[in-house]
Amino acid sequence: MKDTKQKWFRDAKFGLFIHWGLYSVLAGEYKGQKTVHIAEWIMNRLDIPVNEYEKLAGQFNPVHFDAEAIVKKAKGWGMKYIVFTSKHHDGFAMYHSKCNPYNIVDATPFKRDVLKELQLACEKHEMRLGLYYSQAQDWHDPDGYMALKDNSNKNFQAYLDRKCIPQLKEILTNYGDIALIWFDTPMGTTVEQSRGLVSLVKDLQPNCLISGRIGNELGDYMSTADNFIPLLPYSGDWEVPATLNDTWGYNKDDNNWKNPDDVIKLLIKITSRGGNYLLNIGPDSLGQVPQGSLDILDRVGNYVNENAEAVFGTKPLAVPYPYDIDWAGFTHKPHSLFLHMLKGQKRTIYLVRIDNKVEKVTLLKDGESLPFELSVNCEGESIIEIELPPSLQERAGFCIAMHTAEEEPLFESIR
Ligand code: JFZ
């Protein structure tokens, strides 16, 4: 079990992932060929030679990038941390690297250190900043790994010494407090090499967390696969990185946006099982955040803000509710059991096998009392019935608080 021993991470629940780099210039298409894979992998998937891909830097001029606007949005959505791609697999540094000229300041007409801008905006608005850094894959360095290709002739240690380690030192030294380093796809990294990276990070910033994808079981918390959620409450620290369409990096042709109600549902599922939800945006080559993602996050943020008490500071349920109901999800705090309404219901809500003594039922957003009745059915199971006012019948996107005599939820498991 992973334990970060850091309360902020356990309480965070909701964060913003930002995948942004040179791939946004291609936006999923290279010389008339469209990639069917995640757009930040286009160099790999379409076999773009290094010297061709490098040329994108000369065209990268994201004049509409506004770090403060993004941080303010994240704050407004109720998010507690941001994770930004300081260097993705393509090897291009999105900050002013002094040890390697392939970076946004030295190689583009834009010449602005967007990481510095993000750092300052985060400090101003009290937002934690974490950094994604692709430690093993680097498709620009001849000795960096490249998935799906032949890596047999690579001297991976040489790449670590020449680029990865010096760059990690830079991002952990020049950009204030870094909340976490989001390592990824360890590939052939040995235990010794992973251990070396861990001590490097902890020596420079003892409180900086390390994502599970450093490999070799050395991370501080577990990162699941995109949108994968453990079935049962998991008592360690974990995070679900997730896209809002089908790509991390910007793809102009991907408009397969998730339904905001489904995103809310996932957030509640993850929260009730004790995890954090790290939702991604992929700005385009001008630095603009796609409207499709803004629309979803506005809706989700609205729910989060209206029901913050039932999201933040909640504890994972020790026992899951025994039935997989798709119309509601549970979170809890001592003496409160929250029922998040994810799908419209008729006049009476009916729940079985909750053995708590419920003393009061209220609508979370305004405290309005809702009539309810406790009883026992002929099988001896507890039943609670809650009456919805006409305005909430057949409506989703609100939360009901049940105030219970007992501290913990008492779900009767299936006999
Ligand atoms: C990785 C990257 O390759 C991808 O570009 C993106 O940055 C994403 C957040 O992380 O992709 C992965 C890595 C691991 C898993 C899934 C996607 N996994 O363990 O299931």
Image: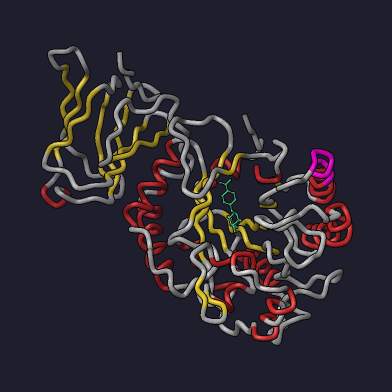
Residue 105 on image: x %, y %: 75, 79
Quadrant (top left, top right, bottom left, bottom right) of the C terminus: top left
Is 195 one of the magenta-colored residues? yes
Q: Is residue 142 above or below residue 101?
A: above
Is 187 one of the magenta-colored residues? no
Quadrant (top left, top right, bottom left, bottom right) of the N terminus: top right
What residue do we see at 19% from left, 47% from top? 344
On the question of residue 199 being in view, the answer is yes
Residues rendered magenta in the picture = 190-196
Name the side, left or right, on which 347 lies relative to 58: left
Q: 25 or 312: nearer the eye?
A: 25
Q: How many marks?
A: 0
Residue 248 on image: x %, y %: 53, 62
On the question of residue 173 being in view, the answer is no
Residue 381 on image: x %, y %: 21, 16
What residue do we see at 67% from left, 55% from top? 147
What residue do we see at 66% from left, 51% from top? 184
Q: Is residue 94 above or below residue 10?
A: below
The prevailing secondary structure element of the residues shown in magenta is helix
Residue 15 on image: x %, y %: 53, 54
Q: 186 or 230: nearer the eye?
A: 186
What residue do we see at 63% from left, 39% from top? 221
Q: Quadrant of residue 330?
A: top left
